[in-house]
Every structure is written in structure tokens, then in C-alpha cells.
Image: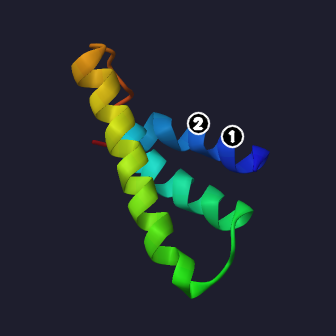
Amino acid sequence: AFLLFFGFVIIMKYLGFVIASLIFLPALMWILGPKTAKSLIPISLTSIAITSVIYIGFTKCLNVFLPSGSLF
């Protein structure tokens, strides 16, 4: 999990917060949670919801800019 988080920080520099989070969160949930095909839908929906709430909360409510990435 620590190596995955370290990779998230590095990837966020290039891809931005949204895309890096949509890669990091499902990967972390897959590592720490049940590894069944049935768990893929809740993992995907939860990752999208968490990323959306954090992005909207920080950018719209708190006026904090999240990393946009250097590739986009």
C-alpha cells in the first residue's frame, strides 16, 4: 500500500489529481479488499464517487486548486 501511494504521488504530477485518483483508489481497494469479480462494480462506483466529492469539495467549495498534471 505504501508503494502504491508513492506511485500515486508521482503519477499525480503527470496525470493530475482526477486521473491519478481514478487509478489509485481502485488499485488500493483491490489490494486491501476482497479479490472477486463481484467486487469490481462497487470498487469502481466508490472510486468515482470519492474522487468526485473530493474534487468538487476542494475546487468549488474551498477554492483550492488540485494538481492538473503536466501531460494534459
Q: Amino acid at mark 2?
A: Val
Side of 18 relative to 24 (left or right): left
Residue at horizontal 54%, vertical 61%? Answer: 26
Residue 9's mark? 2
Residue at horizontal 26%, vertical 18%? Answer: 61
* Mark 2, secondary structure of its residue: helix
The percent coordinates of residue 27 (x first, y second) are 60, 61
* Vertical arrangement, residue 29 with respect to residue 50, above or below: below
Residue at horizontal 32%, vertical 43%? Answer: 52
Side of 60 relative to 39 (left or right): left
Residue found at the very far bottom of the displayed protein: 37
The percent coordinates of residue 66 (x first, y second) are 37, 25
Contact between labelled residues 1 and 2, with CB atoms less than 8 Å apart: yes
* Mark 1, secondary structure of its residue: helix
The percent coordinates of residue 47 (x first, y second) are 45, 55
Q: Nearer the viewer, residue 65 or 57?
A: 57
The percent coordinates of residue 60 (x first, y second) are 22, 22
Examine the image and state in which quarter residue 44 appears: bottom left
Residue at horizontal 48%, vertical 38%? Answer: 12
Q: Amino acid at mark 1?
A: Phe
Q: Nearer the viewer, residue 30 or 6?
A: 30
Residue 6's mark? 1
* Vertical arrangement, residue 29 with respect to residue 19, above or below: below
Q: What's the CA distance linking mark 2 and mark 1?
A: 5 Å
